[in-house]
Image (cartoon, rainbow, N blue to C red):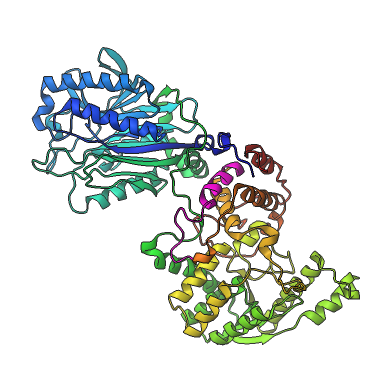
Amino acid sequence: MTETRDHPFYSLHSHGLVRVAASTPKVRTADVAFNCQAILDEARRAHDAHVDLLIYPELCLSSYALDDLHMQLALLDAVEVRVAEVVAASVDLVPVLVIGAPLRHNGRIYNCALAIHRGRLLGVVPKSYLPNYREFYEKRWFANGRQIAGLEIAVNGESVPFGTDLIFAADNLPGFKLAIEICEDFWAPIPPSTYAAMAGATILANLSASNIVIGKSDERHMLCRSQSARAVSAYIYSATGHGESTTDMAWDGQGMIYELGDLMGESERFSLEPELCIADIDCERILADRMRMQTWNDACEAEGRPEDIYRTVLFEHQPAGGDLDLIRPVRRFPFVPNRIESLDADCFEAFNIQVDGLMRRFQSTRGDSMVIGVSGGLDSTHALIVAAKVCDRLGLPRTTIRGYTMPGFGTSEGTKTNAWKLMNALGITAEEIDIKPAAQEMLAAIGHPFGRGEPVYDVTFENVQAGLRTDYLFRLAGHHNGFVIGTGDMSELALGWCTYGVGDQMSHYGVNSGVPKTLIQYLIRWAARTNQFDPATDAVLDAIVGQEISPELIPAGEDGEMQSTEDKIGPYELNDFFMHHIIRFGQRPSKVAFLAWHAWRDAQSGRWPAEFPEHLKNAYDLATIARWLESFCKRFFGFAQFKRSAMPNGPKVSAGGALSPRGDWRAPSDAVADVWVEELRAGLPPLG
């Protein structure tokens, strides 16, 4: 493979991302010259880090804890002089700088945020809500800016836009739209940034001088997370730190960046040195999520269409090109719980969503049994332990479950043994039906070469076996007044890796249909690790998770090598990554490749799910990712939908989505994949 890292594919800006940062500069009380230099030092550091947008704390130019010094004319004059210095110095800097300063207008002082870019003061946003309770007395010095809209303010003789109705937008980077609020504003019941987001802002910034008390850091996290989720946006928060006056309060310099409720990065608190918290924000993902939420549009309409009221201040952004790396957590396994502190709770929730779904369906059928095919593979194993929990919850004997292992021409001794061990350990009703004679007879009856003794292992050879297994299960369900539990998973449905109709695509209830393969693997490991069953069951579960994924429909080769599913359709860990980004956010294939490359190119970098086996930590180069992504697009868009359009009922499990045509995913069964394949090929760099 040859890579040219200046190709647009490697540029984060080509994919709708913007590099943002929260700065905690050095500060000295009332020393405007010192603070100005500290602001510029951090601006240059951000420039060197290829930051596009830099947010500073509230009143960082003057310092915040000044009390009545805010009304001293000498200080206010000095602030304006240093504003001019920052504006002049910004000519050679890439980032948009958003600094805090007190400014005068019509006999009032306003607590302001100033947006500065490339030698230009773009505009000034006043603080809307002034705290005047407990330790705060801002109304003693400042006027609120809640009603200021459509005005201009004179700063150093220049008239610039002034008001809470401003959005700053890059005219050459669609999606880079900034709105600003100040500290107390997002403690208000309806923060000003809510209306700004409805007016089109994707990035919301908060310049803060919030003092620190016990528990306040958690409160700020809660507010930032909530606002970024509720306003469907990114939220950058920057609080002042060491150097502010500690006459009556202390400061921790907390900086954090959220996107759609996810923490992208945070700074070190109580640091004596300046902090620069950097993350790459996906503005395209934010806009895509808004497109999918009609509640968003309804709210905008209900609030009088803020986009018709807000003013947009345009600027021409000149970001660095080429490969700037990616400063952003990209989960390798987006469907797998990744919160270490609540890992067991997340797994418990996922597992019990399935248990509850199957339990309710079993109750409604008023049957005597649950019928399931048990191969000794991942999917049937997971469906079986879910069914076992259903019996436990309902107070039914596990013999209510009728498990059948049905060895075919490719069944290995290992999986068959595991199937029997699992059924015996769980104490279900267990039987074995050898499908080879019936399959041989059917293949001969239809004139298939294998029926004449020829070693032809084609799709028909495989589907005859898959169909017979399903046929047996449905007839057994009728015979025992039960219903068939489907074992196929969401990843197989995405790829169409199942036999349609009379095959593993069909069942009475698809308990795994909302669970991707990577999550099934993890949930089985979790069930064993947390002793959801007895030690004998745990031992079998561990053995099953460790084996090769195979449909076992084709006999082993002369070397004993079994048929490998992933050799045919690609690694499930990649396919699940592709599926998440395509069905949840509608990302372009080239962008999915970009994200996958950053997530998977180095097994030693980034975070893995907790307790993930070391020997399973894989890495993939871009050529491999591109190969399997193109395969995924062809199968997902151009082939597999007819199987999903007729899929049985089954519970949605992940916020990442599901594929039910009655739920998250509705698509025509006869679409073609050309658009996605062509976009991928056009967006990739040359690969050898």
Is residue 143 something that shows in the picture? no
> From the viewer's perspective, is 656 left or right of 138?
right
x, y percentage for residue 639? 72, 53
Q: Magenta span covers which residues?
A: 589-612
Q: Is residue 509 left or right of residue 602?
A: right
Residue 607: say if magenta.
Answer: yes
Name the side, left or right, on which 426 lies relative to 444: left
User: Picture coordinates of residue 477 (x, y %)?
Assistant: 67, 80
Quick check: can you spot residue 4? yes
Of residues 137 and 116, the one nearer the viewer is: 116
Residue at the far top: name it.
Answer: 157
Hey, which quadrant is residue 405 in on the image? bottom right
Residue nearer the viewer, 424 or 544? 544
* Residue 618 against residue 323 in the figure, above or below: below
Quadrant showing the C terminus: top right
- Image quarter for residue 1? top right
Q: Is residue 56 above or below residue 474?
A: above
Depicted 372 relative to depicted 230: above or below: below
Percent from the top left, x then y, of residue 165? 34, 27
